[in-house]
Image (cartoon, helix red, strand yellow):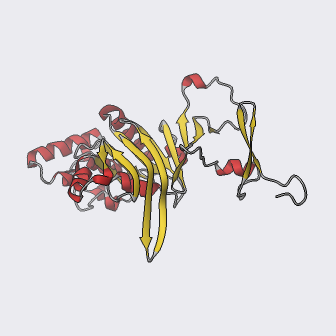
C-alpha cells in the first residue's frame, strides 16, 4: 500500500532550509494496521502530510496504492484526497461542524452524491461505528468519544483504501481511547482497510502489531509484536526487547547505517559521543564508547 524510499522534504523559509525528512524509508502492506511514533520535530507529522497528499516530497520515491505521488498533477492530487485516503484528526475542528447533526456531518464528503443514497450511507456508517441511535443528535449532545466516532464515520464516507489517524485518542480518557482503538481494529479486520496511526503515546502505539519510530527525519527502529512461539525463546541481555509485548529492531539502510536508541547510548556512556568503538565478538557486534587507551592517543 505504501512505499517510501529515500524520502526527503525540505522546507524553505526566509532563506533558511529545514530538512524535515532525511532519506526516510517505510513500507506498509495492504490491509495492515500500524503506528508511527516520534518526538516533536522528528518528522512524523511531515510524513503524515505526504501520505495524505497535503504536501509534496522534495525528493525520493513515494508510492501509495500504486500511485506515484511525485508525478500527480494538482487535479489528480485532489482526486487522490477524495477517493483514496481518509483522515481522522485529534483536533475536532478539522473533522466536525458543531451546528450540524451527526448524520449531516457524515454527509459532507458526499455532497455530490444522490441525496437519498448519501443519507442511507451516512446512516449505515454511523451504525457501523456504534452510533445508529445518535444519528439526529448535534455534536454538543455527544461525548468526546462519540464525536471521535463520528469523525471516523466521516473519514470512511468515500470508501478510502487508506485511513490516516493523527493522535486519534489524544483528547480522550483511557476507557474511551480503548473503545476508539477497538473500533479501528474492527474496521481494519472487517473492511481490509489499511490504517496508519501517528502518535507520541507508546502505550497506544503498542496496541497494534508493528510500530515504527522516526527520529531526525529517518526511520530509526521498528517494534514487532511477539509471536506466541517466540515467548519461550531465550534472549540474552540487551537483545532489544521493548516491554513484554514487542521486540524492538534497529532499522538499517542499504549503506549499513543505523540509529542506536538513546537509552542504549546512555547505558554505555556514549550519548554525546561523536564516535564509538565497534568490535566483532563471535557472532555479535559490540558497541563501546571511544576512549583513549594511552595518554596523548587520539
The x and y percentages for residue 243 are 62, 39
Between 294 and 170, the residue placed more toward the observer is 294
Between 91 and 163, the residue placed more toward the observer is 163
- View extreme (right): residue: 295
Residue 273 drawn above or below residue 123? below
Residue 234 drawn above or below residue 7? above
At a point 57% along the width and 35% down the height, the residue shown is: 245
Q: Tell me if I can see residue 233 in this picture.
A: yes
The x and y percentages for residue 244 are 61, 35
At a point 86% along the width and 57% down the height, the residue shown is: 297
**Which picture quadrant has residue 98?**
bottom left
Quarter of the image where the C terminus is located: bottom right
At a point 38% along the width and 43% down the height, the residue shown is: 2
Residue 100 drawn above or below residue 37? below
The x and y percentages for residue 138 are 25, 56
Between 22 and 108, the residue placed more toward the observer is 22
At a point 61% along the width and 49% down the height, the residue shown is: 259
**Horizontal side of residue 240 vs 173, given as left or right:** right
**Horizontal side of residue 297 vs 83, given as left or right:** right
Amino acid at each position: 500500500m505504501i512505499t517510501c524510499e529515500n524520502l526527503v522534504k525540505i522546507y524553505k523559509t526566509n532563506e533558511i532550509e529545514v530538512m524535515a525528512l532525511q532519506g526516510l524509508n517505510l513500507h506498509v502492506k495492504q490491509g495492515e494496521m500500524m503506528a508511527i511514533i516520534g518526538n516533536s520535530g522528528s518528522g512524523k507529522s511531515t510524513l503524515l502530510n505526504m501520505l495524505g497528499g497535503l504536501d509534496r516530497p522534495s525528493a525520493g520515491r513515494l508510492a501509495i496504492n500504486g500511485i506515484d505521488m511525485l508525478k500527480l498533477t494538482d487535479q489528480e492530487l485532489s482526486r487522490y484526497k477524495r477517493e483514496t485516503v481518509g483522515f481522522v484528526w485529534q483536533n475536532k475542528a478539522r473533522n466536525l461542524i458543531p451546528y450540524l447533526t451527526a448524520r449531516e456531518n457524515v454527509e459532507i464528503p458526499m455532497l455530490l452524491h444522490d441525496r437519498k443514497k448519501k443519507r442511507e450511507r451516512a446512516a449505515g456508517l454511523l451504525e457501523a461505528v456504534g452510533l445508529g441511535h445518535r444519528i439526529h443528535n448535534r455534536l454538543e449532545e455527544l461525548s468526546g468519544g462519540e464525536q471521535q466516532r463520528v469523525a471516523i464515520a466521516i473519514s470512511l464516507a468515500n470508501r478510502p483504501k487508506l485511513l490516516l489517524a493523527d493522535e486519534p485518542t489524544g483528547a480522550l480518557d483511557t476507557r474511551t481511547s480503548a473503545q476508539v482503538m477497538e473500533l479501528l481494529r474492527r474496521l481494519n479486520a472487517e473492511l481490509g482497510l489499511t490504517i496508519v496511526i501517528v502518535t507520541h503515546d507508546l502505550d497506544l502505539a503498542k496496541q497494534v502489531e508493528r510500530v515504527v519510530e522516526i527520529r531526525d527525519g529517518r526511520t530509526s527502529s521498528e517494534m514487532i509484536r511477539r509471536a506466541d512461539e517466540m515467548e519461550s525463546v531465550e534472549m540474552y541481555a540487551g537483545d532489544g526487547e521493548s516491554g513484554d509485548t514487542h521486540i524492538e529492531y534497529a532499522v538499517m539502510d542499504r549503506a549499513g547505517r543505523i540509529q542506536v536508541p538513546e537509552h542504549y547510548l546512555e547505558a554505555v556512556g556514549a550519548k554525546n559521543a561523536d564516535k564509538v568503538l565497534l568490535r566483532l565478538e563471535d557472532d555479535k557486534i559490540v558497541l563501546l564508547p571511544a576512549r583513549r587507551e594511552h595518554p596523548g592517543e587520539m
